[in-house]
Image (cartoon, rainbow, N blue to C red):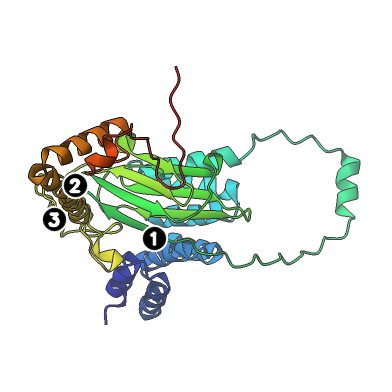
């Protein structure tokens, strides 16, 4: 059984608990493969188990000190554990192994924002050193475990030119949302009302154009629109996608479909077109009825329809000339509304 391959498939399908079990089985079968620990560290990060992610990242670094992804996973975990100085050193080491991976610059910048400028330590006198040496060691206090964090759901779909990632978090404030786009990575950090942070880190299957990506913060969600570098259909959001195909120009079937990772497919362009056609048919039915009444009606019916429609501002349409011909047709507002004349 190929545990690693199946784990990768589960990870792409966002079945992180299942992926974690399969990566663990792969490690049990051969604990010397650094890549297994790298991928499990990424899975732990998805599940917000940052301590385990750091441990797996450290193990991967020990097994293969040239694997830049091992340092990236370890550094990201340390960042979420608020070990900003350690994370900064880890990420700088990883960046020196692969200077083309833009994810390192992104995370190094984040760490630099968190690490305060170093102040020179004041020189200690001999008396202070002697006093400190005679003090009893302070006993370590076990940290209070944090309560489990609620996982927030995200979804994605694509058009011919864009990939849209939707994070289902309500009531986000602009100052609490940090979205960063890179050519092959996507990162989102959102401060929740509880005070904790929601984090989403993605290694994209295909490159995007960061300068043409943008974020919309709505009342019910955060929508991130990524511009594709190539007009191809993505079969996966993350990981290797060797079966990507070119999207036919102007093809409705190739655009606006949910990918296989969402476990269902909907052609939103087709649905929108159907709704539009239904609306047109409905309008056509109503207008057709009025046209028939006008066309088949007598001169009095036509006069009644014209007079009532014009005098009422389009709010009344009558065929009874005997009633309409006697007086001016008053404007009749829809139920629950009041008609008012516009004054300049």
Q: Nearer the viewer, residue 327 or 241?
A: 327
Q: Nearer the viewer, residue 301 or 3?
A: 301
Secondary structure of residue under mark 1: loop
Residue 341 percent across, percent down from the top left: 43, 27
Mark nearest the camera among 3 and 1 is 3
- Provide the residue designation for mark 3: 253
| Residue 155 sits in quarter | bottom left
| Residue 66 seen in this snapshot | no
- Tell me how far mark 3 sits from mark 1, CA to CA: 45 Å
- Provide the residue designation for mark 1: 64
Mark nearest the camera among 2 and 3 is 3
From this view, report whether residue 248 is shown above or below residue 340: below
Q: Earlier in the sequence, mark 1 or mark 2?
A: 1
Q: Is residue 311 left or right of residue 54?
A: left
From this view, report whether residue 29 is shown above or below residue 184: below
Residue 214 percent across, percent down from the top left: 37, 39
From this view, report whether residue 117 is shown above or below residue 337: above
Q: Quadrant of the C terminus?
A: top left
User: How many C-alpha atoms fall within 10 Å of the one at disc 2: few (<14), some, or many (≥20)?
Assistant: many
- Which residue: 53% across, 49% down? 171
- Tell me how far mark 1 sits from mark 2, CA to CA: 40 Å
Secondary structure of residue under mark 3: loop
- Which residue: 52% across, 55% down? 198
Q: Quadrant of the N terminus?
A: bottom left
| Residue 142 sits in quarter | bottom right
Q: Earlier in the sequence, mark 3 or mark 1?
A: 1
- Tell me how far mark 2 sits from mark 3, CA to CA: 10 Å
- Provide the residue designation for mark 2: 160
Secondary structure of residue under mark 2: loop
């Amino acid at each position: 059984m190929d545990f690693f391959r199946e784990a990768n498939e589960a990870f792409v399908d966002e079945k992180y608990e299942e992926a974690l079990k399969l990566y663990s089985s792969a490690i049990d079968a051969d604990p010397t493969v650094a890549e297994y620990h790298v991928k499990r560290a990424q899975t732990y990060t998805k599940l917000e188990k940052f301590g385990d992610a750091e441990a797996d990242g450290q193990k991967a670094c020990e097994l293969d000190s040239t694997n830049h992804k091992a340092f990236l996973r370890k550094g990201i975990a340390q960042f979420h554990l608020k070990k900003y100085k350690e994370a900064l050193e880890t990420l700088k080491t990883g960046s020196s192994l692969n200077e083309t991976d833009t994810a390192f610059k992104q995370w190094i910048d984040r760490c630099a924002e968190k690490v305060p400028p170093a102040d020179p330590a004041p020189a200690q006198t001999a008396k202070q050193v002697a006093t400190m040496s005679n003090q009893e060691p302070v006993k370590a206090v076990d940290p209070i475990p944090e309560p489990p964090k609620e996982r927030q759901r995200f979804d994605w779909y694509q058009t011919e030119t864009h990939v849209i990632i939707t994070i289902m978090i309500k009531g986000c404030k602009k100052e609490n949302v940090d979205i960063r786009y890179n050519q092959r990575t996507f990162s989102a950090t959102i401060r929740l009302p509880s005070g904790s942070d929601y984090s989403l880190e993605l290694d994209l299957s295909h490159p995007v154009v960061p300068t043409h990506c943008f974020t919309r913060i709505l009342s019910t969600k955060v929508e991130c629109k990524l511009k594709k570098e190539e007009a191809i259909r993505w079969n996966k959001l993350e990981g290797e996608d060797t079966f990507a195909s070119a999207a036919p120009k102007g093809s409705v079937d190739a655009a606006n479909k949910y990918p296989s990772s969402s476990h269902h497919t909907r052609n939103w362009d087709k649905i929108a077109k159907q709704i539009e056609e239904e609306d047109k048919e409905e309008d056509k039915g109503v207008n057709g009825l009025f046209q028939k009444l006008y066309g088949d009606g007598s001169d009095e019916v036509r006069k009644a329809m014209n007079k009532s429609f014009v005098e009422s501002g389009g709010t009344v349409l009558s065929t009874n000339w005997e009633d309409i011909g006697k007086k001016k047709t008053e404007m009749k507002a829809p139920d629950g509304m009041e008609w008012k004349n516009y004054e300049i």
